[in-house]
Image (spheres, coloured by chain):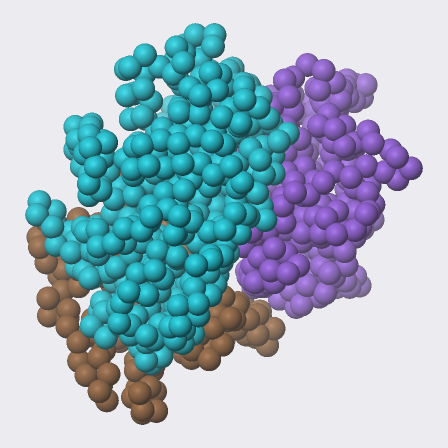
Chain colours: A brown, B cyan, C purple
Amino acid sequence: MSLFAFLTTQSLNALSQAALLFFLGVGLTLIFGIMRIVNFAHGTLYMLGAFVGYSVARSTASFWPALLLAPLAVGVVGVLFELVILRRLYRREASAFLMVTFGLALVLGEIVRLTWGPEALQVEPPQAFAGIVFLAGEPFPTYRLFLVAAGIIIAVAIWQLLDRTRLGLIIRAASQNPEMVSALGIDVNLVRSMVFGIGCSLAGIGGVLAAPLVTASVGMAATMIIDAFVIVIIGGMGSFLGSLIAALLIAFTQVFGEYYLPDFALAFMYLLMLLVLVIRPGGLLGKEA
Amino acid sequence: MTKFRGITRRTVTRSAIAGIALAAAPRWPRPAVAADVIKIGMPLALTGPLGSVGQQLKRGGELWAKTQSASGGLIGRQIQLLIEDTGGNPADAVRKAQEMVERDGCNIFTGITLSSEALAVVPKLEEWKAIFISSDNGDGRLTAESFVPNFFRSNISAPMGARAVSLFLRESEWQNVYAIGMDYAWGRNSVQVFESEMKRANKNFIGSVFSPIGTKDFSTYITKIRQSGAEAVYITMAGDDYNAFLAQAAQYRLPEKVQLLSEVVDLTVPRAVGDAALGLISSMRYCFRLDNPKNKEFVALWQKEYDTVPDNNEGEQWQALKMLAAGIEKAGSTETGSLRSALETTAIDDIKGHVGMRKCDHQAVQNGYMVKLAKGEGFSYPVPQIIATYPGEKTTPVCNKMTFED
Amino acid sequence: MARRPKYLRAWYGIFPAAMLALAPFALPLYVMTLLTEALILGLFAMSLDLMVGYTRLFSFGHAAAFGFGAYASGWLLLHTQLPMLCAVPLAALLAGIVAIGVAWVCTQATGVSFSMLTLAFAQLLYAVAFKWTSVTGGSDGLAGIPRRGGPFGFDAFSSRTGFYYFVLIALAAALVFCWALVRSPFGAVLRGIRENEAKTLALGYNTRLYKIAVVALAYGLGGLAGALYAPFAGFANTELVFWLFSGQVLIMVIVGGSGTLIGPILGAAFFLVVEHQLSNYTEAWALGFGLIFIAFVIFAPEGIWGLLTERLGRAGRSVR
């Protein structure tokens, strides 16, 4: 493989990996940024998205409905949980949220296992992106290109939502000063429900998009949640742009690190995390220090 | 008074305390069917990432118990399986096994799922005066440096699987081989055995790479394999990592360039990755296609009970219990000392043909198989076809070691 | 509100202590094993309470203390001739000393960032434990750890019942130590940091030093729990350093009632026993387990200790 081919393939590998990591982390950072909740159930919601995606894809024999319906379903689950449980806890300490999302992770995880069984399930990529392209003579799966594109689209969409729309303005205001926002006549509770729902939907999208690469499996939640935390920590809790940068940083470090120093593959993410935190305790773009 | 839909805190407090008291109450020993029931402890990983393996072992055990009980039990006594969930956690496995020994008077174990659980339990067997016959643990050291007299292995071990693959490679035209394994004891050990076998077979072992457990993106590893110039790659992976690797390897069209060979595979893999598993060649510990009367009978029985064909671990659990039963019948009792001596020289002719326990290291000597996954009639996913069989003497390592001589 | 007379309040402490001391005579052996493990986890949870309950420092990496202690005592018992009575405290001391460095780095941050730094260190320890096979046994861990008696032939703690008393004494000693600590001026400063760090700082206290101290103490006591676990179970493996375990001990503290020292001990026992019993009965135990936690958050925000003290007529709550 020529150097050019190597660099091209590896960079694209890293970009597609970054896209996956971004989907994983963005929901978590949004929820924390706006609601100050550390959502331990994030990995389980991601997993739920993958399994719902499996069922929808199976019954409609197509990927696209799954991409639409799975995040919707996970978002609904999130909103319901917020309405019934979380809403009682806003006056309480942070430890209440830790425990209640931990409980949700256990309950939801078991429901998934009981519903879909303990085996891993296949989710096929969409027909349009199931092939390969040749880059500098090396085959590269088009699905990964689709992931990169999807990552860019979703990132831009969220950015526009937060930056340009009235809803985004309200969300950002509510994260900084909920009392003032409430005094202006806006239902802060509604805002919170929406944000939690959107955060969970993003987890769901992540799950569905990752499924053709890793299958929908019950072990997903546990492996994903720690990665999600690392992304958000490095990027800065609550920073949308931070999670994007962190995803890119981690992906490139891992892809090239795994290649040249595979023995340290396990430690890369954590070393990076430690390095970032020592230099900037709040994360790269975090607000806390 | 905080109220939540009419339920007062006081009510909840009282029920909580009652619940806690109930939960804390030590569980009474299971009601025994009769005073001299034969109890076989199975602390399985029924939930968690390897839950599907534990479920297979459970099904294999339950069908055996059902069949054996239907024909009058074992040495005139009823059989009872003690099945509990360890979640794949070694601490839980030890705790539950100990409880089975002390609360239920159990002295026979099988079905411990993870090698980490087995490694935690094995040092305690002597203290518990309990026999453990493995149906699933492949770690080579359990019959080598970690060997204890109360341990028996009925299943094909990881070195035996690696050996089968290397014997297959000897007969093939492929010269240049690479290896990839999961980065923990099993992966490292299996690749090591394979590497030494390749050198003895005068094949070119180009190199190896290990991926951390929980790797989700294998793109870099696939690049490495591709770049190595290998014609075949030896894979020691299992579970979610294996599924992800195969799915992604197929997406990169790796199988077109490099033949994938793996140490072990079961039917959950092609079910999880579909056509990405086509063409995979692997050693398999039990295959439903084995062509002998006992196996055909077993497969028919299994299909009647579970409406599907038996998988890798299901067959292995069946065989382990058959071995155990033969040992108990030979000893005429379940007393640990006599059972141990009897098992050491037990041999059966069952679903995998002739299988005989070896006295020196308690490894069951049995045929090794190589399968290739291909489309099969009546299956929606690729299924194994047996492409090579090797006699037990050739695939079983030297006593108490993980090396071979030939 | 009339308070119960003092001697009655002392009875609330003596009664459970007596029950625990006499337990080996009344309970079957397998229940004693469960109880011993509950006490070890109780010590672990109580050590975290010093940080969480009294100083509002949420550690997401406390398993590192436990795991480090377990590996240290396990290694010492396997590779040296040291008896348990020496290896266990030594391992705990090592854990505390190493924790000073960790604490120094982590306390550079506050709030969630502090928690994440503790997680980072714990994960790094996990990676080291996983890969440094020659010392830690890698993914297999250390097995066959003996309960070596001595010095001078003192063997009483090596039997099952003896080891139970060893753990009980260690827990009691640690509890007394922590209780005295939180009632001392040191403890008052910790509470000041918990309520309002800026004010405490303004009062002239070097809050950073106090935080480092409490973290080191907490990790040291957590290390003691781990050091006891290694000879108890006979093995030490990477699961003991895993982030899931860190999350579980945090839950134990919250379920038990943070900031009460005894609450977390009860929380740990509760967690262990309920998980053990539920999984004996059904595969779907995680469902019930999760629902229990959610119910606790909604109905019993003060945790088990809160429920008990409410029930027993407000006689407790002495250490808040």
Q: Report whether B186 appears left or right of B94.
A: left
Residue at the spot 38% in from the left edge and 72% down from the top edge: B203
Q: Position of residue A65 (x, y in %)?
A: 12, 57
Quadrant of the drawing holding the N terminus of chain A: bottom left
The single residue placed furthest to the top in the displayed view is B35
Q: Position of residue C138 (x, y in %)?
A: 57, 57
Front one among C288 and A144? A144
Q: Position of residue B150 (x, y in %)?
A: 55, 33
Q: Quadrant of residue C8?
A: top right
Residue at the spot 29% in from the left edge and 26% down from the top edge: B63
Front one among C133 and C186? C133
Q: Report whether A140 appears left or right of B82.
A: left
Q: Quadrant of residue C284?
A: top left
Q: Is residue C72 visible?
A: yes
Q: Position of residue B204 (x, y in %)?
A: 39, 75
Q: Report whether A192 appears left or right of C120.
A: left
Residue at the spot 17% in from the left edge and 63% down from the top edge: A125
Q: Is residue C290 visible?
A: no
Residue at the spot 77% in from the left edge and 45% down from the top edge: C88
Front one among A34 and C179? C179
The single residue placed furthest to the front in the displayed view is B406
Q: Is C290 drawn above or below residue B387 in the view shown?
A: above
